[in-house]
Image (tube, coloured by chain):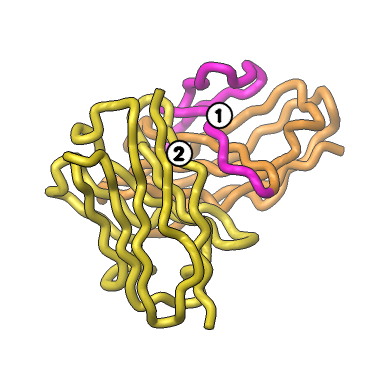
């Protein structure tokens, strides 16, 4: 059974940084691309970033390009999202997801609040 | 990176069938069969109800079905029940290697 567990959320300062982590289990992690999706309070789902299994292909939404960095450690079955230059509009629940591989799998999410 | 287009709201009476549309382009919905649908109740994690256009995960009611024609995917809920009242989102892979979500549809059971 695929399991994804996010951590690292919390309160961040405007202009500050946070690093999210997602621990994966139940599948051959290095084989598959991983994705971060977020949902701001009262809003819909927004794709944030994806990284291929080998880290050779990385993609970002325009809203986070240049501020967020996705990475992965296949030896530890983890994917990360480094969030810099945080803005109030980055406040959201962030989900780690395995998409496009049969039934999608999502974590429970971690809440990021950007406020002074 | 434009969102897929969904109606803001759809309503129906118990027992009726409703259909939610999800319109994209020839670069996403029209090009790939990687279209998923999610159900989300308030305060809950999105739940996958359809993947790869037509497939239902184990445990999801057969009242939910998916289809696609051209650049538009559709989710049909038959025999509408009170518990189906929720927000529904579609998602598609794109030719840019990214994913795109619809804006969401609020389903109301009258």
Determine the residue positioned at 31% across, 49% down: B98
Q: Give the Cα separation between the discs numbered 1 and 2.
A: 13 Å
Is B77 situated left or right of B15 in this image?
left
Mark 1–mark 2 contact, CB under 8 Å?
no
Determine the residue positioned at 14% across, 42% down: A54
Main secondary-structure element of the magenta-colored stretch: loop
Is B57 in front, or is A6?
Answer: A6
Chain of the residue on which disc 1 is drawn: B
Q: Is residue B49 above or below residue B28?
A: above
Is A59 situated left or right of B103 in this image?
left
Q: Colour of chain B?
A: orange
User: In the rendered image, which quarter is residue A41 located in?
Assistant: bottom right
Q: Which residue is mark 2?
A: A106
Q: Is residue B44 above or below residue A27?
A: below
Q: Residues within 10 Å of mark 2 (few under 14, many from 20)?
A: many
Determine the residue positioned at 30% across, 72% down: A67
Secondary structure under badge 1? strand
Is A19 in front, or is B40?
Answer: A19
Range covered by the magenta-colored residues? B43-71
Badges 1 and 2, same chain: no
Chain of the residue on which disc 2 is drawn: A
Q: Colour of chain A?
A: yellow
Q: Which residue is mark 1?
A: B49
Determine the residue positioned at 50% across, 70% down: A11
Is A1 situated left or right of B86 in this image?
left
Q: Position of residue A5 (x, y in %)?
A: 42, 42
Q: Position of residue A43 (x, y in %)?
A: 60, 59
Q: Residues within 10 Å of mark 1 (few under 14, many from 20)?
A: many
């Amino acid at each position: 059974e695929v399991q994804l567990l996010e951590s690292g959320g919390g309160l961040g300062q405007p202009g500050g940084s946070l690093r999210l982590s997602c621990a994966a289990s139940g599948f051959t992690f290095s084989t598959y691309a991983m994705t971060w999706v977020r949902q701001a309070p009262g809003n819909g789902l927004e794709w944030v970033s994806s990284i291929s299994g080998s880290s050779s292909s990385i993609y970002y939404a325009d809203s986070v390009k240049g501020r967020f960095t996705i990475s992965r450690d296949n030896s530890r079955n983890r994917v990360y999202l480094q969030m810099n230059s945080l803005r109030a509009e980055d406040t959201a629940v962030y989900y780690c997801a395995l998409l496009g591989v049969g039934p999608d799998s999502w974590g429970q999410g971690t809440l990021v609040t950007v406020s002074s | 990176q434009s969102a897929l287009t969904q109606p803001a709201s759809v309503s129906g009476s118990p027992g009726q069938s409703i259909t939610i549309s999800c319109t994209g382009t020839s670069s996403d919905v029209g090009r790939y069969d990687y279209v998923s649908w999610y159900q989300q109740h308030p305060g809950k994690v999105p739940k996958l109800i359809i993947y790869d256009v037509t497939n239902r995960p184990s445990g999801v009611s057969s009242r939910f079905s998916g289809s696609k024609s051209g650049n538009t995917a559709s989710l049909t809920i038959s025999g509408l029940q009170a518990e189906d009242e929720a927000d529904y989102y579609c998602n598609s892979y794109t030719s840019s290697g990214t994913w795109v979500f619809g804006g969401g549809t609020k389903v109301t059971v009258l």
